[in-house]
Image (cartoon, grey):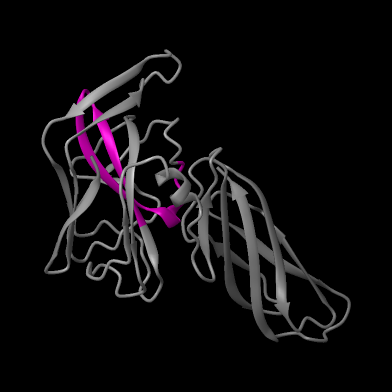
């Protein structure tokens, strides 16, 4: 009754769910019923070599494995945890079909595309910093169990990343390079699925007579610009550090 890694072969990753029984909530979400599905034989899913799932070379990452309830048949799906998807099992999800060009961090992938299906988190897999799209060394495999959801909430990435809280709120953070006096647009590594509540950003570097300010926030990113009372500091390089909250 656990997720296990089946193989990494020629750069491809295969994950397998062993026989088990899973309780899914109703696809109507408010019916008050639970759908129990028995998995009588192992279920597998393969991510081809070259498909990055939005992972970044030289940055450690975590992949979350989901079991989908496709009209009473369990299928597997996989997603990059850094994509910021709501994974608390109270929502329905839509997936895209896996291919060699499955390179989005915010997209949930399964062998065949599915729309508005219930799901269960059945495990996660941690990978060390390596080459994006080449599935090789694995740091840890956490199988199905009561600590899976807790485990995926505490994962962070160095420098930038995303975390989904138990209530579905998503926190993203990151750094973007810029120069004093030159406004720009900062794109999040992955967009918020629904909405952004707040973006807080500050300038790290020499500013002189300029005042940095963010504005125009959206699910995809935000803009920033400068107010100034003198030309001191114009053109100096630095970094925009931001934290964004949404769902």
Q: Is residue 224 above or below residue 27?
A: below
Indicate the position of residue 24 as horizontal and vertical percent values: 33, 26
Expressed as whole percent of the image width and height from the top left, the position of residue 30 reads: 46, 16
User: Does 70 lie within the magenta span?
Assistant: yes
Q: Residue 170 magenta-drawn?
A: no
- Viewer-nearest residue: 123 or 107: 123
Work out whether 117 lies above or below 142.
above
Report the span colored magenta.
63-86
The quarter of the rendered structure image containing the N terminus is top left
Depth check: 228 or 166 in front? 166
Q: Residue at x 12, y 31 (%)?
A: 40
Q: Residue at x 43, y 21 (%)?
A: 29
Residue furthest right in the image: 229
Quarter of the image where the C terminus is located: top right
Percent x, y of residue 179: 66, 80
23 with respect to 91 (left or right) = left
Residue 111, located in which quarter of the rendered image?
top left
Q: Along the horizontal axis of the image, is 123 left or right of 19?
A: right
């Amino acid at each position: 009754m656990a997720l296990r890694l089946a193989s990494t072969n020629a750069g491809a990753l295969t994950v397998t769910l062993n026989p088990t029984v899973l309780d899914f909530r109703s696809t109507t979400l408010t019916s008050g019923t639970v759908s129990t599905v028995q998995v009588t034989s192992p279920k597998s899913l393969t991510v081809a070599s070259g498909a990055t799932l939005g992972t970044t070379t030289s940055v450690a990452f975590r992949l979350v494995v989901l079991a989908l309830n496709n009209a009473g048949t369990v299928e597997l799906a996989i997603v990059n945890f850094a994509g910021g998807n709501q994974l608390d099992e109270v929502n329905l999800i839509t997936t895209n079909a896996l291919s060699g060009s499955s390179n989005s961090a915010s997209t949930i992938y399964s062998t065949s595309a599915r729309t508005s299906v219930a799901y269960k988190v059945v495990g996660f897999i941690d990978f060390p910093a390596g080459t994006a799209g080449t599935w090789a060394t694995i740091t840890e495999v956490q199988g199905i169990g009561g600590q899976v959801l807790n485990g995926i909430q505490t994962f962070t990435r160095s420098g930038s990343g995303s975390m989904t809280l138990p209530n579905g709120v998503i926190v993203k953070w990151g750094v973007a390079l810029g120069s004093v006096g030159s406004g720009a647009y900062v794109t999040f590594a992955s967009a918020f699925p629904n909405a952004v509540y707040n973006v807080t950003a500050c300038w790290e570097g020499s500013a002189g007579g300029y005042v940095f300010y963010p504005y125009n926030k959206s699910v995809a990113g935000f803009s920033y610009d400068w107010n100034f009372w003198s030309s001191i500091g114009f053109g100096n390089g630095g970094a925009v550090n931001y934290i964004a909250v949404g769902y």
